[in-house]
Amino acid sequence: MKRFVQAALGALVAGGVALVATAQTKSTADGIAEYRRMLEDGNPAELFEAKGEALWKQPRGPKQATLEACDLGKGPGVVQGAWVELPRWFADTGRVQDLESRLLTCMQTLQGFDAAALAKTPFGQGEMHTLEALAAWISGESRGLKFALPQAHPQERRMYELGRRAFYFRGGPMDFACATCHGEPGKRIRLQDLPDLRGNPGNGVGFAAWPAYRVSSGEMWSLQHRLNDCYRQQRFPYPGYASEVTIALGVFMGVNARGSESIAPALKR
Amino acid sequence: MSDPMRIRAQAAGDKATVRVLMSHEMETGQRKDAAGKVIPAWYIQEVTASHNGKVVLTAQWGTSISKNPFLQFNIKGAKAGDKVSIAWVDNHGDRRSDEATVA
């Protein structure tokens, strides 16, 4: 109300229509920001974080082992700070892996699950709930830290280049690329800002805001779910859970986001 | 078995603000699954909040409450160190109770 009065007074003083228009545009964005702040207080992602932490420490799978010896890139069992340095090169598997493909590796080697079968599980079913909870907790352990993905290994640089190409690759029935929606600043769809992912969109935006709890569907979405669904929205088939192209896009966005603060697990409409 | 609630209780002045996140499907009974069958209703019916064992809030809930609900309220006269407990019962008769200390 106060802002409205100020805007009205400002318009009277300046006698300009343009000023009213700017004030109104600003208040739309302000309104969205205010709505998000109100929701932030009770982010149900917290429930998934708690679940993820319990799952990490719980003996599971055919081998009845915990994941506490899992190496997420900073040494076995080190969780804090791991999220902001993934995806990265892993010598033991000889691959660049993101968090979720790495979790599949750990669930196979430590707990005896079949990683390929896990990756084929549809989103929102069975062990996918385990993976999304683990992703929520592990990313939450890096809350407020800055992205610092390594690019020292040639394979990490290759994946960045692959991700960059995938980002600009146009195709499918609608001739879409990631860049069609995320290659321009200041765009939004309804109430959703579209981050410009060609560069660094800033703290807690884009790559730095996933995994996230989606209020509309009441689901926890991991980055893999987000990226696979981006392809679905472009009318491509799912590239697959922990597929190379989704990891490459993770490297591309993560390296671009270097220095930005992670707010994951975030809250989305 | 349902997952634990997340309860935060923060004292400020002569009251404490309590924030509760509950883990529940809150299925309305109006949705259908992929096979076209109605998904049966499953929701929290009653919520009770107690302050040091004394009931300070009861709420009758229905299907219009969201999945994984968030509840916030103030307790007058609550101080740091007090116990706040929250309990719910759903239409299956399942119940869950969790406790937190006012910070």
Image: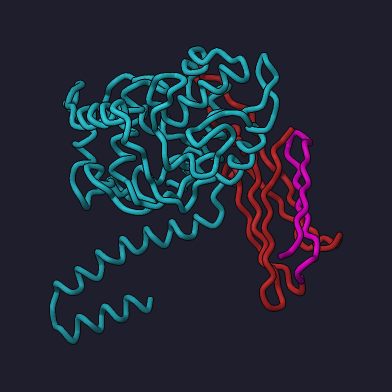
Q: Residue B35: image x %, image y %?
A: 52, 16
Q: From this view, report whether residue A47 is shown above or below residue A224.
A: below
In percent of the image, x 31 and y 40: which residue is there?
A255
Q: Give the range drawn in magenta.
A: B78-103
- Residue A238 visible? The answer is no
Is residue B95 highlighted in magenta?
yes
Q: From this view, report whether residue A160 is shown above or below residue B20.
A: above
The residue nearer to you, when weighing A57 against B22, is A57
In percent of the image, x 73 and y 51: which residue is there?
B47
Q: Residue A80: image x %, image y %?
A: 54, 44
In percent of the image, x 63 and y 49: which residue is there?
B21
- Residue A231 lies in quadrant: top left
- Residue A196 visible? The answer is yes
Q: Which tint is chain A?
A: cyan
Q: How many marks?
A: 0
Q: Which tint is chain B?
A: red
Q: Residue A150: image x %, image y %?
A: 35, 38
The C terminus of chain B sits in image quarter: bottom right
Q: Which colour scheme is used?
A: by chain
In percent of the image, x 67 and y 14: which residue is there?
A62
The residue nearer to you, when weighing A45 against A251, is A251
Is residue A22 highlighted in magenta?
no
Q: From this view, report whether residue B27 is shown above or below residue A111.
A: below
